[in-house]
Image (cartoon, helix red, strand yellow):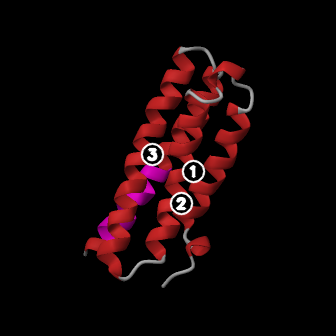
Amino acid sequence: MKDFRELQVWQKAHQLTLAVYQVTAGFPREERYGLTSQIRRSCSSIPANVAEGCGRRGDAEFARFCSIAMGSASELEYHLLLSRDLKLIKPADHVELAQRTIEVKRMLSVLMQKLSA
C-alpha cells in the first residue's frame, strides 16, 4: 500500500482541483448546483480515485481506479470547454486549466501502463 500523497500525479491533480475551485468561485449563483458542481465533482474525483486506488490490493485494482480518474479528467476537459464557450471562465484560465488537465491525463496514462506491465 502506497501513500498517495507521494505520487506526483496525485499532487498535480490535487493542485488542479484547488485551482478549479478558485476559478469556479466566480461562477454565477444560478450555476451553483449545475456546472459549478459538475466541474468540481469531476475534478476532485481525479485525485480521490488515485487515493482510493492506492488503498486497494494489487496493481490491477489500482489501474482500474486510475482508469476511473482518467474518465473524470476527460469529463473535466469538456466542462472547462463548455464554461469557456458560455463565457463563465476567461480564455486564459481555460487554457491553463485545460493544459494542466491534459498533463494529469498523460501522467495517469503512464501510471496505468506501468501498473499493467
Q: Amino acid at mark 3?
A: Ala
- At 49% from the left and 49% from the top, the residue drawn is 103
Callout 3: SS? helix
Pointer 2 with pointer 1, Cβ within 8 A: yes
Based on the picture, tell me whether residue 14 belongs to the magenta stretch: no
Q: CA distance from mark 2 to mark 1?
A: 6 Å
Q: Could you say which disc has been placed on residue 25 in the image?
A: none
Residue 91: image x %, image y %?
A: 61, 21
Pointer 1 with pointer 3, Cβ within 8 A: no
The residue where tag 3 is placed is: 73
The residue where tag 1 is placed is: 44
Disc 3 crowd, CA 10 A, few/some/many (<14, 14-19, 20+)? many
Q: Amino acid at mark 1?
A: Ser
Residue 13: image x %, image y %?
A: 57, 54
Disc 2 crowd, CA 10 A, few/some/many (<14, 14-19, 20+)? some
In the shown orientation, is residue 81 left or right of residue 23? Answer: left
Q: CA distance from mark 1 to mark 3?
A: 9 Å
Q: Amino acid at mark 2?
A: Ala
Number of callouts in the render?
A: 3
The residue where tag 2 is placed is: 48
Callout 2: SS? helix
Residue 12: image x %, image y %?
A: 59, 56
Q: What are the residue bounds of the magenta stretch? A: 104-114
Residue 117: image x %, image y %?
A: 25, 75
Mark closest to the chain's N terminus, 1 or 3: 1
- At 54% from the left and 59% from the top, the residue drawn is 47
Farthest residue to the top: give it: 86
In front of the other: label 3 or label 2? 2
Based on the picture, tell me whether residue 109 belongs to the magenta stretch: yes
The part of the image, by quadrant, that contains residue 90 is top right
- At 69% from the left and 48% from the top, the residue drawn is 18
